[in-house]
Amino acid sequence: MLYTGRAPFGAAPSGEPVEQLTLTDGVLSCRILTLGAILRALTVPDAQGRPVDVVLGCDSPEEYLAQADYLGAIVGRYANRIAGGQFVLNGRRYTLEKNGGACHLHGGRIGFSRRVWTVESLTDSQAALRLDSPDGEEGYPGRLSARVTYALNGGTLSIRYEAESDADTLCNLTNHAYFNLSGHGSGPVLDQEVALSARYYTPADENGIPLGTLACVDGTPMDLRTPAPVGFRLRNGEAQLRRSRGFDHNYVIDGEPGVLRPAAWARSPAAGIRMTVETTYPGVQYYTANFLAEGRRGKNGSRYGPRHGFCIETEYFPDSPNQAAFPSPVLRAGQRYDQKTRYTFSCGSTKNPGDGGTP
């Protein structure tokens, strides 16, 4: 019988204990760590009813802390990149660590992904975790209190992101799960199909920083609105893809930000597992694991490498603090940050949602 509850999972370098929380709704099950609020495992039934763990992960806190791929972690305060590690807020310039080449990446050297979160509440199918970030941490202003709630219900995993600050600050939280719908240890995802509900994307420079424009995907290789194998799209020779060795781009999700709406669709022909993603965020960073090291150790003795997963990171656009035309990631003092992303799993028919070829 699947154990539901909480169990020890080693310790952080500080000696602070790390726990693993197990949730189930009778269809799905998942395992969440208090370290980085990491989604360590997500088990989904395939077309034959067999359980398949569809997210990449590690077997110990030490392995998670030794890698820089953010496997399954909650990243913040600011997910993705900030150019030059600087931004201006209320007329004051703030300087952040450049831990991603010329950029500030995923909240800094420690960020939210390498800290131990507090379990605020836990039931068989839901876990809420909290993290308090002091004023000045990683260079950000304001004392921020963040809460992430994982919930399973009827074949759907929901993640709710909430935060409040005592001073104006930036907030952009996401989950950095690497999905492999054929199973986390099954190898490259090149035959798996992915589609995004996005007519526009933000072209980027060699550092992954948006150029400040929205480009229409119509008639270009960057058009992901029709499901196609990951490998097929990676072979198109598009300059943007050559620059980042594959997809690592922000897409502007169709519809109104703040409203839960379709964002992405994916399918494994081998397992018969389909995933639909809905979000309230304005964008999705689609990443094809271009820099996942060949042979890196994964769960249960598996080995991972480039293209062994794909990420659908729902979030604000990269470098939004420095791009006035982008949706603002500023969280004002006393206001409430509240975003949601929902992943729904099914199997069986290969027909696309809506029968129209788009998610």
Image (cartoon, rainbow, N blue to C red):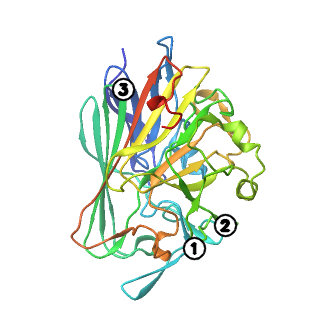
Asked whether the beta carbons under mark 1 and mark 2 sit within 8 Å of each other, the answer is yes
Q: Residue 217, percent across and down?
A: 60, 54
Residue 283 as seen in the image, left or right of residue 127: right
On residue 83, which mark appears? 1
* Residue count near mark 2 (Cα–Cα under 10 Å), binned few <14, some 14–19, many ≥20: some
Per the model, the C-alpha gap separating discs 3 and 1 is: 38 Å
Q: Is residue 275 visible?
A: yes
Q: Residue 238, percent across and down?
A: 74, 53
Q: Is residue 103 above or below residue 338?
A: below
Quickly name the residue at label 3: 155
Quickly name the residue at label 2: 207
Residue at 74% over, 41% down: 294
Residue type of the residue flagged with mark 3: Gly
Q: Residue 315, percent across and down?
A: 44, 56
Residue type of the residue flagged with mark 1: Ala
* Residue count near mark 3 (Cα–Cα under 10 Å), binned few <14, some 14–19, many ≥20: some
